[in-house]
Image (tube, rainbow, N blue to C red):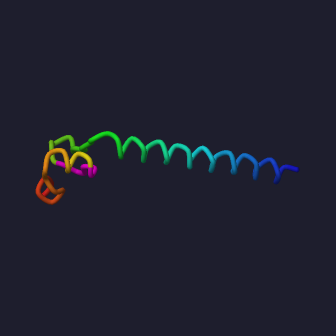
Amino acid sequence: MFNNRLKGELELTRSELTRQKAFIEALNQSMASITFTPQGEVVDANALFLKTVGYTLPRLAP
């Protein structure tokens, strides 16, 4: 009984994680984004941002 409850909770958690990952991926594909360190160095940029500005990631973050 206790084990079944935990299995159910685990399944709900996995389902929610899958939903959240899909949401983040949809945002990443529809919004240009770039990430900086506190010092202003580029850490990452998604493909849409790179396409929009016409740069490659190595050129932005040498």
- Residue 30 is situated, as x and y percent measured from the top left of the image, at 34, 41
Magenta part of the protein: which range? 42-47
| In magenta segment, residue 17 | no
Q: Position of residue 26 (x, y in %)?
A: 42, 44
The residue depicted at 21 percent of the width and 45 percent of the height is 37
Task: Determine whether, in the image, residue 50 is placed left or right of residue 5.
Answer: left
Q: Residue at x 25, y 51 (%)?
A: 44
Name the foreground residue: 7 vs 30.
30
10 w.r.t. 27: above or below: below
Which residue is at a point 76% across and 48% down the rendered structure image?
8
> Which corner quadrant holds the C terminus?
bottom left
Q: Quadrant of residue 32?
A: top left
38 displayed left or right of 25: left
Residue 56 horizontal/vertical position (percent): 16, 57
What residue is shown at x 76% (from left), y 53% (from top)?
7
Q: Check residue 44 for magenta coloring.
A: yes
In this picture, is 56 found above or below 8?
A: below
